[in-house]
Image (cartoon, rainbow, N blue to C red):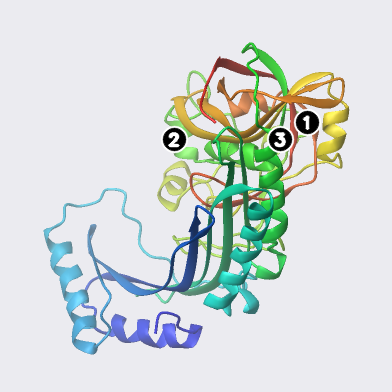
């Protein structure tokens, strides 16, 4: 039962809505089916399948709202969760920012579902992981990997007539490879909507090459360097910047706040080469065509040629400011260029190749100052060639400043954030004057 079709979800939601006695009622329904396999020390350690289905009901009297959820679906339980939400609403304080539900909307069908990914079996997961282990065993490395696939759906219906439904598939694979002495490390992460694009053998080859090549790392002096960030490194850094909320900007809580009040909408904040947008119909990174508020997702430019083009406004804040509501990004695509990673290395007189960043923490949200560490393969470049592996280093940098120092961008590819496991389309990038502050002995 975890996965319901559009028609099945609509029928169930209509039944739940029929129990409502509140002024307003919004019902959310979501389900997921999927599985995973994990390896450690070059052998499978765990594997499993999951199936979940849950329903939440928000009832409102005036401006007082209560929400209750349940994962039982007999008629008595469905009515019980509606009554519970109504009881909670009567006890709740008024929400001065309450917005009435939207009426019927029209949403385009998304392209987030893939039959092959939805049909992945435990045997397929084992086969894909076996190809990864084949690489690490042949290279005398030790691997820890994780592969997970899932098919999920989300549906919402309200008492004003809105209904929306979306079904999506995803598969993600991550692997860390190390030599037995623990002196060299490599990493790869891949994620797709269509499983036929996932090459666990090829991804592990890259991670294995990083692990072998990073043995014998030397220390170099911290300071400002030209860096080449692979997409896996860049995405974790930039993810902290992909919040374009107008309210936090207008309230002075964001890097998009203007000194003295207002936002930096329309200002040029970054290099001309930087363009960031969202598009639910991007073939490599499709997304849902509707937002939680019931607004349609459309192609939206957030940064175009370095200029802030749009901020997102929820319905309450949009009404307060007298502007059209704009839902937040459904996905994030950063445009790139044509340079390959090899091209970037060849054109670098003195710099550092960064495979991955991790443990990133916020230092100052108003200027988006971040600190974190390199990991899993950091290499010194001189005269257009990788000379030797170097010890990991801590950096202090802002992605906004970083994107003002762009020299070259490569072709965007789907990259997985280490922190959120979300996918983004991000190019490899060559950045000048990236600030490293200290060394780390961690491998």
**How far across and how far down the image is residue 441, in percent?**
52, 22
The residue under the point 57% across, 53% down is 174
Whether residue 391 is visible: yes
Is label 1 in a helix, a strand or a loop? loop
Nearer to us in this view, 225 or 177: 177
Is label 3 in a helix, a strand or a loop? helix
The residue under the point 11% across, 59% down is 91
- The local crowd at label 1, few if under 14, some if 14 to 19, many if 20 or more residues have their Cα within 10 Å, is some
**How far across and how far down the image is residue 176, in percent?**
57, 47
Side (left or right) of 382 relative to 125: right
Side (left or right) of 126 relative to 253: right
Q: Look at mark 3 in the image and give the residue it sits on.
A: 213
Dot 1 or dot 3: first in sequence order is 3
- The local crowd at label 2, few if under 14, some if 14 to 19, many if 20 or more residues have their Cα within 10 Å, is some
- Kindly indicate whether the residue at mark 3 contacts the one at mark 2 (C-beta within 8 angstroms): no
The CA span between labels 2 and 3 is 44 Å
Q: Look at mark 2 in the image and give the residue it sits on.
A: 248
Nearer to us in this view, 348 or 129: 129
Q: Look at mark 1 in the image and give the residue it sits on.
A: 272
Would you identify the image quadrant in which residue 17 lies?
bottom left
Q: Give the mark toward the camera: 1 or 2.
A: 1
Nearer to us in this view, 243 or 349: 349
Would you identify the image quadrant in which residue 162 lies?
bottom left
Name the image quarter holding the N terminus. bottom left
Side (left or right) of 324 relative to 343: left
Whether residue 269 is visible: no
Side (left or right) of 425 relative to 322: right
Name the image quarter holding the C terminus. top right
Dot 1 or dot 2: first in sequence order is 2
Q: Give the mark toward the camera: 1 or 3.
A: 3
The CA span between labels 1 and 3 is 35 Å
The residue under the point 44% across, 48% down is 319
């Amino acid at each position: 039962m975890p996965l319901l079709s559009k028609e099945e979800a609509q029928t169930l939601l209509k039944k739940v809505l029929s129990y409502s006695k509140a002024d307003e009622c919004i019902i959310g329904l979501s389900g997921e089916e999927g599985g995973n396999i994990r390896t450690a020390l070059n052998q499978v350690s765990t594997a499993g399948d999951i199936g979940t289905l849950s329903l939440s009901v928000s009832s409102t009297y005036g401006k007082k709202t209560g929400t209750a959820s349940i994962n039982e679906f007999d008629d008595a339980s469905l009515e019980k969760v509606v009554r519970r939400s109504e009881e909670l609403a009567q006890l709740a304080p008024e929400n001065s920012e309450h917005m009435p539900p939207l009426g019927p909307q029209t949403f385009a069908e998304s392209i987030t579902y893939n039959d092959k990914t939805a049909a992945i079996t435990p045997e397929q997961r084992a086969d894909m992981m076996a190809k990864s282990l084949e690489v690490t065993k042949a290279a005398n490395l030790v691997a820890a990997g994780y592969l997970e696939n899932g098919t999920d759906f989300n549906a919402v219906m309200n008492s004003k007539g809105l209904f929306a439904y979306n079904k999506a598939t995803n598969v993600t694979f991550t692997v860390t490879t190390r030599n037995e002495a623990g002196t060299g490390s490599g990493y790869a992460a891949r994620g797709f909507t269509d499983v036929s694009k996932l090459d666990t053998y090829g991804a592990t080859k890259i991670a294995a090459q990083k692990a072998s090549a990073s043995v014998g790392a030397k220390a170099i002096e911290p300071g400002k360097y030209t860096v080449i960030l692979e997409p896996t490194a860049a995405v974790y850094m930039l993810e902290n910047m992909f919040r374009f909320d107008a309210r936090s900007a207008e309230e002075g809580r964001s890097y998009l706040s203007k000194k003295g009040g207002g936002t930096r909408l329309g200002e040029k904040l970054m290099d001309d080469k930087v363009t960031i947008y969202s598009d639910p119909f991007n073939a490599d990174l499709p997304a849902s065509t509707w937002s939680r508020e019931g607004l349609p997702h459309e192609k939206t430019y957030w940064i175009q040629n370095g200029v802030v083009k749009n901020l997102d406004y929820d319905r309450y804040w949009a009404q307060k400011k007298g502007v059209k509501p704009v839902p937040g990004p459904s996905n994030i695509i950063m445009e790139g260029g044509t340079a390959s990673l090899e091209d970037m290395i060849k054109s670098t007189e003195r710099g550092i190749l960064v495979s991955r960043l991790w443990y990133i923490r916020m230092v100052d949200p108003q200027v988006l100052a971040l600190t974190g560490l390199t990991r899993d393969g950091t290499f010194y470049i001189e005269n257009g060639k990788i000379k030797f592996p170097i010890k990991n280093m801590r950096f202090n940098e802002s992605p906004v400043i970083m994107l003002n120092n762009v020299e070259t961008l490569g072709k965007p590819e789907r990259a997985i954030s280490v922190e959120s496991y979300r996918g983004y389309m991000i190019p490899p990038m060559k950045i000048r004057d990236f600030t490293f502050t200290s060394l780390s002995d961690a491998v």
